[in-house]
Image: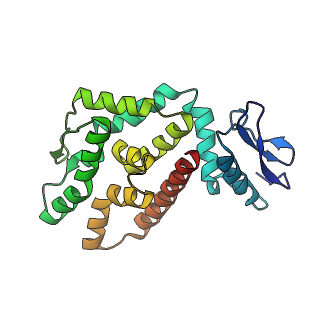
Amino acid sequence: MKRFYKEASASTAADGGYTVLLDAKTVKTPRRAILSLPNLPLAEAIAMEWRGQRERIDVQTMPLTRLAFAALDVATPEREEIEQQILKYGGNDLLCYRAEDPPELVARQAHAWDPLLEWAAGTYGARLNVGCGIKHVPQPPGAIAELRAAVARCDEFELAALHTATTITGSVILALALAEERVSAGEAFAAATLDETFQAEKWGIDAEAEQRRRRLLAELTATERFLRLLA
């Protein structure tokens, strides 16, 4: 889309929240909802993304805008479905599936992942089971219920960010740890890609895979920033 405005600025919204103005017009989501944001810092950060556009608008370069759109267009009207998508990862969380060998990889997984599972158990009362290989590891219903309660406490903006972080990492535990500032985006991504990193050390880096890793890390880093702006 060709850039159609000269100025982008943060402003108060009619509902008491904040929004972004393109010249004098309020930004609307793809589903035509008014872009109503919970605080001024987030509105200003999103306005900066719009100011940074050149002759053509490229939404792929506007991760905060995309997350805000997702919060209003998806997480709000389809909240139950989004929660269920997140919780599916709780039943098959990456951190619960361990290698049987080589010993070095087994040790790395335990070192990186065990403290996060302990954190989840202590923070949410959600103690998940761990197994080796690809065979399904059944999880205690009580633990899943605690994770469901944690997800349900998120507002629509937090939920959109949590969904993105869970999808990128393959772990609802890592996503919650990122939201709670237990880990940074870099730490969460390192934990999520531990197996890939180990294989790359042994067999070399694949250029296409490395490009994908950089793209996903950038997206997760933007998600972390979105979460911090919500605080």
Q: Is residue 110 left or right of residue 14?
A: left
Task: Tell me what residue is drawn at x 23 percent, y 45 percent.
Answer: 96
Q: Can you give x and y, in whole percent of width and height, for residue 109 in the image? A: 22, 57
- Give the residue drawn at x 71%, y 56%: 48
Task: Identify the residue at image location x=84%, y=42%.
Answer: 25
**Residue drawn at point x = 65 percent, y = 48 percent:** 42
Name which quarter of the figure residue 105 lies in. bottom left
Residue 91 coordinates in the image, percent (x, y): 29, 35
Q: Is residue 109 above or below residue 84?
A: below
What's the colour scheme?
rainbow
Q: Position of residue 123 (x, y in %)?
A: 32, 40
106 up-or-down from 140: above or below: below
- Give the position of the C terminus as an image quadrant: top right
Q: Nearer the viewer, residue 49 or 133?
A: 49
Q: Position of residue 39 (x, y in %)?
A: 66, 43
Q: Number of marks in the image?
A: 0
Left or right of residue 94, residue 62 in this image: right
